[in-house]
Amino acid sequence: MDNRTIEYKNLREKLEKYLTKDELEDIDKAYAFAEKKHHGQYRKTGEPYIVHPLFVADILTSIKADRETIIAALLHDVVEDTETSKNDIKEQFGPSVAKLVDGVTKINNIHVSTDNEYLTTYYKKIIVGMSEDVRVIIIKLADRLHNMRTLYALDHEKQKKKAKETLEILTPIAHRLGMNKIKSELEELSLKYLKPEAYNDVVEKLNKKKVEREAYVKKMMDEVSELLTKNGIRHQIKGRAKSIYSIYRKLDKGRSFNDIYDLLAIRILVEEEQECYLALGLIHSKYKPIPKRFKDFIAMPKTNLYQSLHTTVIGLDGNIFEIQIRTYAMDEIAENGIASHWAYKENKNAATEMQNITEQKLQFYKSIIELQEDKLTNEDFVDTVKNEVLNNNIYVYTPKGDVIELPKGATPIDFAYKIHTQIGDKLTGAIVNNSMVPLSYELKNTDVIKVITNNNSKGPSREWINIAKTTSARNKIKNFFNRNTKEDYIAQGKDLLEKELRRKKIPISDFMSDENLKKVFEKFKLDSVEDLYLNIGNNKFSAKSIVKQESDEEKPEEKEVKNVVRVGDSDILVGDTKNIEVHIANCCLPLPGDEIVGYITKTSGIRIHRKNCSNIELFEDRIIDATWNDVINNKYNSEIIIHSTSKENIIFDIVQAAAAMNIIVENVNLIYKSNNNVYSVDVLVKDLETMEKFIINLNKLKYVSDVERIMK
């Protein structure tokens, strides 16, 4: 009997304890399918490849994963590493399994590096996987755990890279899902390869007093057990091994090894929640508790569903013991988090309930979805996920005891906007732990916060943008001012349009006729009269360009030319034709990187437009293919509109940001002055990529709420 047969026999014995006969037959079929597909493939360890999916499935039996998840674990690499397609999986094992395998395959195909673009893609793939089915991520965690167990087979550099990726991305996600058992092992294995000296130092320190420590724990367990039995509390009690990674983190922060309280630790499991508190009272009556070391996570659970009582007492011979008290159900959740629902659900809806819990209870899941909706840049997205969502978090409470998770340094403003956008917009004050605090107050772990709102409030202060810690709160504040600015733009646009109509001596009723508006909406891709006013008011389109009639419509060849280059030494290639005068159209100002076409004019050669320019739609018969050359020698004109949230003049900041990118600012006009200034900026820039980076950098400026490149 070879290793594969032995491992599958072991796997099946574990599955027999909680799956039905029919489900086991489906798993037999999946194993046979995977074994055949991976035949002839070997891992870096020298083992047949099928051993890996077998061990992944084995890890998942510890959390009593359902039939579909076990099958998907056995098949999780067949699409990526063999000729098998998603449709093959669907035909053989059904759509649910195919969806799980496809989800894991997509995540595995992202090659993570320190480049933020890859990290962004990885995070988003994980979130999409979770939004579709949280079991995708659970399989991925089990997959990574087995790979970490066999990391010795890779070279030194790959070991460090894989360990770093695991520690920075996957262990925080395991923590958020409450899967502590898998998280702890991933952390320790990552530390072992990332910092072997630190890992071995902790192991050595633990081993030095291991026998003495175990003797103290055993004696303390016996005393506590006798105390509980004497008082009629049925229980189970066990020693708790301290995580090597957790000890390393404390030592790394300057703690002494002898000062780490929970090196001596026990856990008490009881049947009912009320027995947790009875046991706590009995323990405190016999052993002196250490002040400020008691935590009640039963009354106020963590956002990853964790519940337990924690206390630290002075026990035998003056030794300090950390004691955890929880029910058996709480212990299952503490170890396996979201996956604990498999163990406690006998019906077929466990996976559905897990998905509902993921969406409803895990605030980080909601936070990342909100970040996607905020349309952040790749760099900001990754920074926000790492710094605000996955790390350095505090837990604060509403007056009703609901837990709210926020990044360290968050303020009552962040809290209010986390609850609801309207709460944030109407915020006028905050009470923390029954004391009035300023809105700039930094919230602390376990603070109880009550926010004061006023329905007559005019909205947030612009200064809040600088006070708020979270990207989400800052964006919501900016959106408030953008919404209010919109009303100003609409009023201004209406006024500008009517002035232009009077100047042209065109009756307003004629221009506003259904027939004419339909033509205007189609040409400028607008949806309504309000949209028309808005786009004139914010200077995206000029009133003049909107009003011009077909009879005197400005043709593309009659427009002002800002750039002239010849094909002979040009940045632009037009078919096979050479030495023809080429002009850049002023209506759309294309940049290298934009898709372009040439328009054959009657008198001045070829005019180059963006492919989506509305002016070329009327002259399809005179369009010729055009492309940018591989090497660009010139800079090109472009125009942007910058919306500010302040009266402050930011022209110097604009020019400075441009100079840092070798962009020439030709002209800056303050086109709308109010509480929210609007600037029109003409620049000379190398290409579209540089322009897009410039816009990103401008958006990061303190008082900038929006930047857009315009097409006249």
Image (cartoon, rainbow, N blue to C red):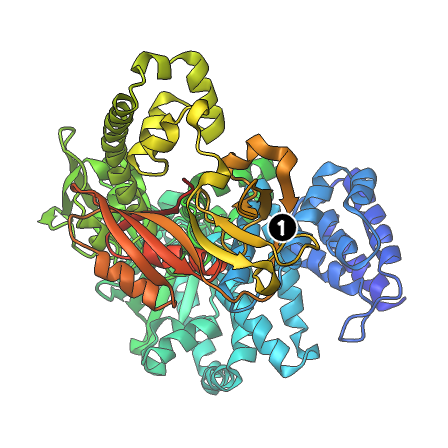
- What percent of the width, then of the height, locates residue 25? 83, 43
Residue 690 lies left or right of residue 479; in this view the side is right
Residue 626 lies left or right of residue 473; in this view the side is right
Question: 430 or 284, which lies in front?
Answer: 430
Q: Residue at x 56, y 61 (%)?
A: 571
Label 1 residue SS: loop
Q: Residue at x 68, y 54 (%)?
A: 577
Query: Is residue 574 shown above or below 529?
Result: below
Residue 513 lies left or right of residue 29; in this view the side is left
Question: 561 or 336, which lies in front?
Answer: 561
Does the rendering let one see residue 17?
A: no
Q: Residue at x 36, y 49 (%)?
A: 640
Q: Quadrant of residue 514?
A: top left
Query: Is residue 476 shown above or below 682?
Result: above
- What percent of the width, then of the height, locates residue 530? 34, 24
- What percent of the width, then of the height, locates residue 286? 28, 63
The residue furthest left is: 436
Task: Pick the quarter of the image with the N terminus.
Answer: bottom right
Query: Is residue 137 shown above or below 674?
Result: below
Task: Pick the quarter of the image with the C terminus.
Answer: top left
Query: Is residue 425 shown above or below 606?
Result: above
Does the rendering let one see residue 91?
A: yes
Question: 515 or 298, which lies in front?
Answer: 515
Q: How many numbered discs, if any?
A: 1
Residue 58 lies left or right of residue 508; in this view the side is right
Give the residue pinned by disc 1: 626
**Mark 1 burial class by Cα count in 10 Å: few <14, some 14-19, many 20+:** many
Inspect the image, locate mark 1, and give the three-letter code of the amino acid beneath it: Ala
- What percent of the width, then of the height, locates residue 45? 76, 75
